[in-house]
C-alpha cells in the first residue's frame, strides 16, 4: 500500500510517499520539502497568512515531484494522509483541503494525522529504527513532553512544559540577543564559540521530583543578564548563548533519564526540531551509554516538520489498527490538539 503524506502545519510544506510492506516498518519511497524560513526572516517570525498562501503555491508541485521521483501514478495511491493538527489553522486547512480533494478525485480514503505523533514516530524513518516500548522526549516548537510509548497509538503522558517549551526558550533567548529568525539554530551555532559556564543561569524544575518542564524563568534570566551586560553584550554574546543552551540541555537530559529510571525502560527516542541540537545529542548519548540505554533519533532531515513523518505515522497507524482511513471527505482541523487526549491521534 502506498501512502501519500502532506504536512502544512506551520512554515514547511512537506510531501512524501511511503510504502507499507506487510508487518515490517514502512519504507520511504520519495519526499520533497519547501521551507519558508527566507520569507519569514524579514518579520522575525512566522506570519500565519503568508504561511498559508505559500502552502497553496507549493503543495501540488511538491506532490508532482514526489510521485515523479517514486515512479508512481496518482491512481496507484492507497491512502492520502495529512496533518490535521496541531498547528496554524489556515496552514492546516491548506493541507487538509488538498488531501481530501485528491482523495475524492481518486476515490481513495484519507486519514488525518496528529502532528506530534508524526514527530514521535519519525525515528522509524532512520536506518536504526527503535522497538516498542520506549520513552519519547518530544521537543518540537511549543511542545516539550515526555511520553511512555507502548505501541502505535498507545501513549501515556509522563510530563510536559507548564509554560515555555524548550524550542520557545531557544527562540526567545535568541531574539533577546538579536540573533534573528529562526533563533534556535542561530543560538546553537553561536554557542559553539562560547563558554557554557560563563553565566550561572537557572535550571527550572530540575529538582522538582516530577517530569514537568518550565523554561519561562530561564528566558527571564537571559533577559536580565543581557541588560546587565549592556554595551558588553556583543562581546559576551557567545558566552551567554552557550550558557543558555547548556541550561536547556541539562534539564532535558536529566528529566529524560529520570523518566527512564521511573519506568524501568531501556530505550529512549528524541524527536522534534530541538532533537537536532548537537549538544543535546552528545550529552544524551554519553549519559545513555553510561547506563546501557539505547537512544534513537530521526535523521537530521526529519527533525523539522516534513511530509515523511506524516506518511509514516499514517501507514503505521493503519498497520496497527490504530486508525481507519475514510472516504468521508468533509474535514476539519485542530489547531490545538493534545496527543494523549482520548481519540486524539485517530
Image: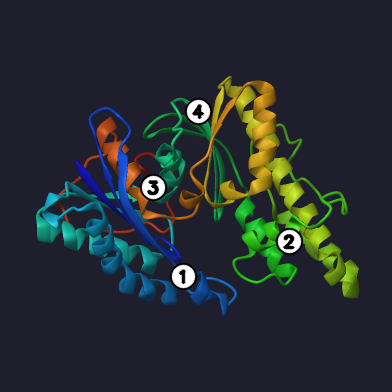
**For the residues marked 4 and 1, what is the alpha-carbon distance in whole angstroms?**
33 Å
Secondary structure state at the residue bearing disc 4: strand
Of 252 and 124, the residue lying toward us = 124
Q: Residues within 10 Å of mark 2 (few under 14, many from 20)?
A: some
Of 149 and 102, the residue lying toward us = 102
Secondary structure state at the residue bearing disc 2: helix
Q: Residues within 10 Å of mark 3 (few under 14, many from 20)?
A: many
Of 25 and 29, the residue lying toward us = 29
**For the residues marked 1 and 2, what is the alpha-carbon distance in whole angstroms?**
22 Å
Q: Nearer the viewer, mark 4 or mark 2?
A: 2
The answer to whether 77 appears left or right of 139 in the picture is left
Q: Nearer the viewer, mark 1 or mark 2?
A: 2
The numbered mark, 3 or 2, whose residue comes first in the sequence reads 2
The residue at the point 73 percent across, 68 percent down is 176
Q: Which residue is mark 1?
A: 36
Total tally of numbered discs in the picture: 4
Q: Nearer the viewer, mark 4 or mark 1?
A: 1
Q: Is residue 20 above or below residue 79?
A: above
Could you say which disc has been placed on residue 190 in the image? 2
The numbered mark, 4 or 1, whose residue comes first in the sequence reads 1
Q: Which residue is mark 4?
A: 134
Return the x and y of residue 44 as percentages of the image width and height: 60, 75
The answer to whether 138 appears left or right of 185 in the picture is left
Q: How is the image coloured?
A: rainbow
Return the x and y of residue 213 as percentages of the image width and height: 66, 44
Secondary structure state at the residue bearing disc 3: helix
Secondary structure state at the residue bearing disc 1: loop
Q: Which residue is mark 3?
A: 309
Of 80 and 90, the residue lying toward us = 80
Amino acid at each position: 500500500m502506498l501512502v501519500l503524506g502532506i504536512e502544512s502545519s506551520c512554515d514547511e510544506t512537506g510531501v512524501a510517499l511511503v510504502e507499507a510492506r506487510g508487518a515490517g516498518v514502512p519504507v520511504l519511497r520519495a519526499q520533497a520539502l519547501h521551507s519558508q524560513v527566507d520569507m519569514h526572516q524579514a518579520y522575525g517570525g512566522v506570519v500565519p497568512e503568508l504561511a498559508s498562501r505559500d502552502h497553496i503555491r507549493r503543495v501540488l508541485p511538491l506532490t508532482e515531484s514526489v510521485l515523479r521521483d517514486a515512479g508512481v501514478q496518482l491512481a496507484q495511491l492507497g491512502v492520502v494522509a495529512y496533518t490535521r493538527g496541531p498547528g496554524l489553522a489556515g496552514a492546516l486547512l491548506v493541507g487538509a483541503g488538498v488531501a481530501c480533494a485528491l482523495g475524492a478525485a481518486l476515490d481513495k480514503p484519507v486519514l488525518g494525522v496528529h502532528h506530534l505523533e508524526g514527530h514521535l514516530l519519525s525515528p522509524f524513518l532512520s536506518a536504526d529504527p527503535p522497538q516498542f516500548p520506549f520513552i519519547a522526549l518530544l521537543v518540537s516548537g511549543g511542545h516539550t513532553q515526555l511520553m511512555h510509548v507502548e505501541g502505535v497509538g498507545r501513549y501515556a503522558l509522563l510530563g510536559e512544559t507548564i509554560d515555555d517549551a524548550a524550542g520557545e526558550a531557544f527562540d526567545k533567548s535568541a531574539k533577546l540577543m538579536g540573533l534573528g529568525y529562526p533563533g534556535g539554530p542561530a543560538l546553537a551555532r553561536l554557542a559553539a564559540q562560547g563558554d557554557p559556564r560563563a553565566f550561572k543561569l537557572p535550571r527550572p524544575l530540575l529538582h522538582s521530583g516530577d517530569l514537568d518542564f518550565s523554561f519561562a524563568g530561564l528566558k527571564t534570566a537571559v533577559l536580565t543578564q543581557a541588560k546587565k551586560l549592556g554595551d558588553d553584550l556583543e562581546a559576551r554574546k557567545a558566552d551567554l548563548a552557550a550558557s543558555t543552551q547548556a541550561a536547556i540541555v541539562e534539564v532535558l537530559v536529566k528529566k529524560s533519564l529520570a523518566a527512564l529510571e521511573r519506568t524501568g525502560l531501556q530505550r529512549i527516542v528524541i524527536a522534534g526540531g530541538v532533537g537536532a541540537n548537537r549538544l543535546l545529542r552528545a550529552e544524551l548519548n554519553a549519559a545513555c551509554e553510561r547506563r546501557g540505554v539505547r537512544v534513537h533519533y530521526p535523521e537530521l532531515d526529519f527533525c523539522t516538520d516534513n511530509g515523511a513523518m506524516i506518511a509514516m505515522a499514517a501507514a503505521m497507524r493503519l498497520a496497527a489498527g490504530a486508525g481507519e482511513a475514510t472516504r468521508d471527505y468533509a474535514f476539519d482541523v485542530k489547531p490545538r490538539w493534545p496527543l494523549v487526549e482520548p481519540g486524539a491521534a485517530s
